[in-house]
Amino acid sequence: MRGDVGQEEIPVNLELLSDDNRVGMVLVLGVVLLGSALADLMEWSDFFLGSGLLGHLLMPLFLAGGALLVLRAGRRLLTPGCRPLLRVNFGGVTDIRLLSAPIRWSAIVDAHRPRGVLRYLLPGVVMQLHEDYESAGVETLWSRLIHLPCRLRGEHVLFLECGTLDHTTEQALAAIHSHLRARHKSGGRR
């Protein structure tokens, strides 16, 4: 039991995987774009016919964009298994979309859900980092661009987006909190 004095809580390790529903939506969008352009080329429909010059500009965009989306979604669906996007383990927190290496537990002060209306609009976790945390070498360029407004205000945070994953945002937050509690109980040795 957790209430026992002699027993320690074991931190929860999670590997959150991408959700195939998002890939399916990309495939549907690609098929609609590609299908409407191909149908017009084969004279099966008049989707672009009445648009004049705009139709001649949009049709190649629909062809290229639709083909790209179909190929990307098809490649992902033909790859067995899901792609891990977020890892919470003893080494730290790794979001492969934003980080090239894990953020160590010693750099993480706290984690919480966004406050106010953003809590319901953004399914994610905000990690509060130490003030001496250096993002160069760990965060990707994309992550530094996303977090630039916060860094300019002097806030050291990292937002982990959990909306397309197989676990809930609360499960990811609970896993992060369990590691932070274990670190504080052990005196910050990790």
Image: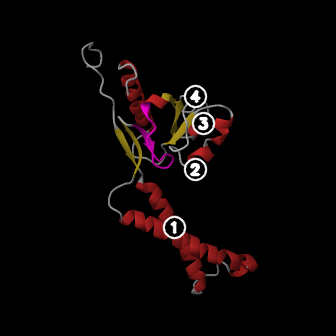
Mark 3 to mark 4 CA distance (whole Å): 24 Å
Describe residue 4's horizontal placement relative to residue 52 as left or right.
left
Mark 1 secondary-structure assignment: helix
Circle 3 residues within 10 Å: few <14, some 14–19, many ≥20:
few
Q: Earlier in the sequence, mark 1 or mark 4?
A: 1
Q: Position of residue 172 (x, y in %)?
A: 42, 36
Residue 115 position by quadrant: top right
Which residue is the site of mark 1?
A: 69
Which residue is the site of mark 3?
A: 118
Q: Position of residue 120 (x, y in %)?
A: 56, 37
Q: Amino acid at mark 3?
A: Leu
Q: Which sits in the foreground, 21 or 76?
A: 76
Looking at the rendering, the stretch of residues picked out in magenta corresponds to: 92-105
Mark 2 to mark 1 CA distance (whole Å): 21 Å
**Which residue occupies 60% across, 73% down?**
62
Mark 3 to mark 1 CA distance (whole Å): 30 Å
For the N terminus, which image quadrant? top left
Labels 2 & 3 near each other (Cβ < 8 A): no
Q: Amino acid at mark 2?
A: Trp
Circle 2 residues within 10 Å: few <14, some 14–19, many ≥20:
few
Circle 1 residues within 10 Å: few <14, some 14–19, many ≥20:
many
Which residue is the site of mark 4?
A: 131
Q: Earlier in the sequence, mark 2 or mark 3?
A: 3
Mark 1 to mark 4 CA distance (whole Å): 41 Å
Q: Amino acid at mark 4?
A: Glu
**Which residue occupies 36% across, 43% down?**
15
Q: Position of residue 128 (x, y in %)?
A: 54, 30
Which residue is the site of mark 2?
A: 142
